[in-house]
């Protein structure tokens, strides 16, 4: 009643098969040491197989881990072309704040101060954002104005120039905000009229 792999105990019950000999596998198949699947292919080694990919299958390779960072250090950006140009965007915001302030005599000094010192502030914020990712993240949120932001940024210098042309914005403040003297503007537009 017993076979070569099954043995009876003294109580008449089946005993566990003996462990495989050295070099022999449990299933007796050296090509499939962990057994075979239903379709006859050898089973893989048990255990975790690595991270799953987006499709749900496991990949055989894992991504290398980045080197550990020292606390309190940041990775400075090495070139000025990396990331957005925060300076130009901040200058545009400062211009858009200074422009309406130029229409009131009470806030005209504020507009002049923004126009005079704003570019230095914009450059400093740009340099800081390139060094500190948290500053860049704040500026990204503050400067995200949607698809109309570019139109607004292009309209502000035109509105400043129109204000200077009609003496609504003082010429000195207008030049700080990027406008030109109306006479110089006309001369560059129609050179013959300036000679007349």
Image: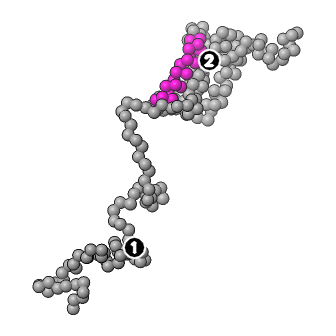
Magenta span includes 120:
yes
Q: Which tag, 2 or 1, sits closer to the chain's start?
A: 1
**Percent x, y of residue 122:** 55, 21
Q: Which residue lies under the disc numbered 1? A: 42
Label 2: element kind:
helix
Please provide the residue range marked out in magenta: 111-132
Q: Residue furthest left?
A: 10
| Farthest-out residue, front | 22
Residue 9, above or below 182: below
Q: Name the residue at 14% across, 84% down.
A: 9
Q: Main secondary structure of the magenta part?
A: helix
Q: Is residue 164 visible?
A: yes
Q: Which residue is mark 2?
A: 99
| Quarter of the image where the C terminus is located | top right
**Residue 160 percent across, percent down from the top left:** 67, 18
- Residue 166 is drawn in which quadrant? top right
Marks 2 and 1, how far apart at CA: 76 Å
Residue at 65 percent across and 23 percent down: it is 156
Q: Which numbered disc, 2 or 1, marks the residue closer to the eye?
A: 1
Left or right for 50, reference 91: left
For residue 88: magenta?
Answer: no
Q: Is residue 143 left or right of residue 177?
A: left
**Residue 164 against residue 22 in the figure, above or below:** above
- Residue 190 is labelled as none
């Amino acid at each position: 009643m017993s076979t070569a792999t099954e043995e009876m105990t003294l109580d008449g019950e089946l005993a566990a098969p003996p462990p495989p000999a050295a070099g022999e596998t449990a299933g007796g198949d050296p090509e499939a040491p962990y057994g075979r699947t239903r379709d006859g292919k050898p089973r893989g080694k048990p255990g975790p197989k690595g991270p799953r990919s987006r499709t749900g299958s496991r990949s055989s390779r894992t991504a290398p881990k980045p080197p550990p960072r020292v606390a309190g250090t940041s990775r400075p950006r090495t070139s000025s072309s990396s990331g957005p140009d925060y300076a130009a965007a901040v200058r545009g915001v400062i211009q858009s704040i200074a422009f309406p302030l130029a229409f009131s005599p009470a806030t005209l000094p504020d507009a002049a101060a923004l126009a005079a010192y704003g570019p230095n502030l914009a450059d400093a914020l740009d340099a800081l954002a390139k060094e500190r990712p948290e500053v860049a993240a704040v500026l990204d949120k503050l400067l995200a104005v949607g698809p109309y932001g570019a139109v607004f940024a292009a309209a502000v210098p035109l509105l400043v120039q129109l204000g200077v042309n009609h003496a609504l914005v003082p010429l000195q403040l207008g030049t700080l905000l990027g406008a030109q003297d109306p006479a110089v503007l006309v001369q560059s537009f129609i050179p013959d009229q300036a000679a007349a």
